[in-house]
Amino acid sequence: MKQFKSRKLILLIAVFVLVVANVAYASGGVENYKIFIDGKPVQFNKDLGYPIVENGRTLVPIRIISENMGYNVEWENKEQKLTITDTKTTIEFKIGETTALVNGKRVPMDTREDENGKSVPVDTKAQLVGSRTYVPIRFISENMGATVDWKIEGKTLYVYIVRPGTTPTTPNVGTIPGTADYSENGYIENIKKISEFFGKDLDTRMGGKTMASFNPIMGGTDSSFLYVVNRPGEDYEAKVVVKNWFVNSDIGTPMEKEMKKINPTVKEVLRFYLPDGYEKLYKIIDDGFNWRWDDASKYVNKDISNLIGSDKPVKLIDGNGGLHIEIGTN
């Protein structure tokens, strides 16, 4: 849980992919790139080109990104101009220029905020590297209506692009009937329902009437991805402990398939206990695991019920072995 423990890279939620390279080089440099479009990895090679960093900006070979996003790409050698189009958008780049035409409107390819918070252009140009046109990845993605997210792990920069109208594929994990019973003896029925929801992924070596462990890989008892505790006599009415969080991967192993269950499973457990605040709570947790918090002290070790719109107290605690979500804390 290093994202919650040390917070060595506390980054603004509003920071875009273009800034990531600056942060990475300041802390040792990015050596590898993993770019995903709708959850599928882009396969770069020496013929198509690899991402590069110039002046702290992440640039990509435009053809491979555009074609993976389903856009048409045309190159005019005489004018040194490249055009990408879909049914709604046309973007024209000219080599050596710092702006592009988006549906006929001239737009700077790179901006930053000045001391007054105003967006100002930055001198980042479309350029030829060998025979390939390179442009900032954020520019092409966002001007085609896609969303861009990112994270850094070690020396690797991960970039996630989601096209408009699509979402990365995640398993349908089903639902837990109803919502949690917070009466004196309701915890027994709560855990029973969650255990049935976990199904074959329930670790029967852990739990019983007061605890349910989600462990789809069934390694040691410490290999569970999350567990739920709901027992009387504690300082909380229910606790959800998230030990791992799904990270997009191109490993292609059976483990990856099981990892994809984590996010929807956590979200459904949170819905069961906090029907009025689970979506905002889920986003806060996802932002934390993916380094998007601007300040961890806003969320950790304090009641965040007002932030998520819950009528029950809710605390996020960076505890041993995972992120503890304590509900109905005293």
Image: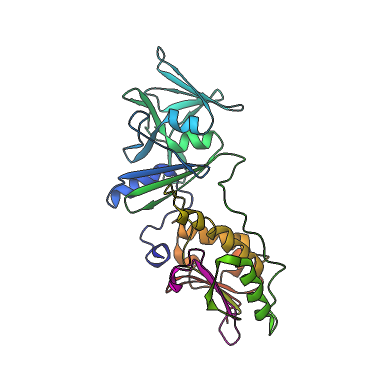
Measured as percent of width and height from the top left, residue 104 is found at 55, 22
Measured as percent of width and height from the top left, residue 193 is found at 66, 72
Decide if residue 235 is in sight here. Answer: yes
Magenta-highlighted residues: 210-236
Picture quadrant where residue 173 is located: bottom right
Asked if 23 appears above or below 173 in the picture, the reply is: above
Q: Is residue 48 left or right of residue 255?
A: left
Question: Is residue 262 shown in magenta?
Answer: no
The N terminus: image quadrant: bottom left
- From the viewer's side, name the closer residue of 323 and 17: 323
The C terminus: image quadrant: bottom right
Residue furthest left in the image: 28
Measured as percent of width and height from the top left, residue 179 is found at 70, 69
The residue depicted at 60 percent of the width and 79 percent of the height is 230
The residue depicted at 42 percent of the width and 54 percent of the height is 11
Asked if 101 appears above or below 262 in the picture, the reply is: above
